[in-house]
Image (cartoon, rainbow, N blue to C red):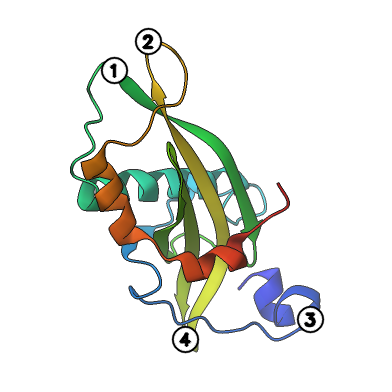
Amino acid sequence: MGYRERRGGAGGRPKERDDIDDSQFPHRLRLRVRFAETDANRHVSQVSYLIYFEEARTALMAEHVPTFDWFTGDHTLVLVRQWIDYLAPAHFPDRLDVWSCAVTLGTSSIRLAHAITRDDAGGTTRIAQGESTMVLVDAARGTSKPWPELVRADWTRLLRPKLAPAFDRVR
């Protein structure tokens, strides 16, 4: 049991339970914390959460954006922004769910929201949340380029704009 669980959440306040479903986040990646992802404090290292987001992004695209060709020579995806809020610790060998959705779609960018939850005896606890923004870049020119229409249609099906305010940050 981690520090926050014993104290009842940040600042001693009771933690809120979080029932996430696919109406909010259409993609879920299930994973188990590996011992190698923990640090000297015996909880998951902060950098591991960013790797969880990466795993979720690539799985989301493989499953829900099949029209995107990862291997063509004329474009690449660049991660231009990422942030994370750590809400509660995770430990080895916890089972986690990484939930993902698109919250805004630009001409050449996509902003994804992520929430990481852990199943506890009393329900589901959100232990982290964050955002990843990617831009489609013309590989030869090094400048952004618009999403192809079929890819844009795939992204549009993943949009959950009502979640955007909860993930907005000072830019």
Compare marks 3 and 2 and give the one earlier in the sequence.
3
Residue 123 in the image: above or below residue 22: below
Which secondary structure lies at badge 4?
A: loop
**What's the residue at 24%, 53% (across, down)?**
64
For the residues labelled 3 and 2, say whether their Cβ atoms are less than 8 Å apart.
no
Is residue 29 at least partly visible in the picture? no
Observer-nearest of 21 and 166 = 166
Q: Position of residue 45 (x, y in %)?
A: 59, 48
Which secondary structure lies at badge 1?
A: loop
Residue type marked 3: Gly
Q: CA distance from mark 1 to mark 2?
A: 7 Å
**Residue at the disc numbered 2:** 140
- Quadrant, the N terminus: bottom right
Numbered tag placed on residue 12 in the rendering: 3
For the residues labelled 1 and 2, say whether their Cβ atoms are less than 8 Å apart.
yes
Give the class, few, some or many, for how many residues have Cα within 10 Å of label 3's Cα (few <14, many ≥20).
few
Observer-nearest of 20 and 87 = 20
Numbered tag placed on residue 121 in the rendering: 4
**Residue at the disc numbered 1:** 74
Residue 8 in the image: above or below residue 162: below
Q: CA distance from mark 3 to mark 1?
A: 52 Å
Compare marks 2 and 4 and give the one earlier in the sequence.
4
Is residue 9 at least partly visible in the picture? yes
Observer-nearest of 83 and 43 = 83
The quadrant where residue 70 appears: top left
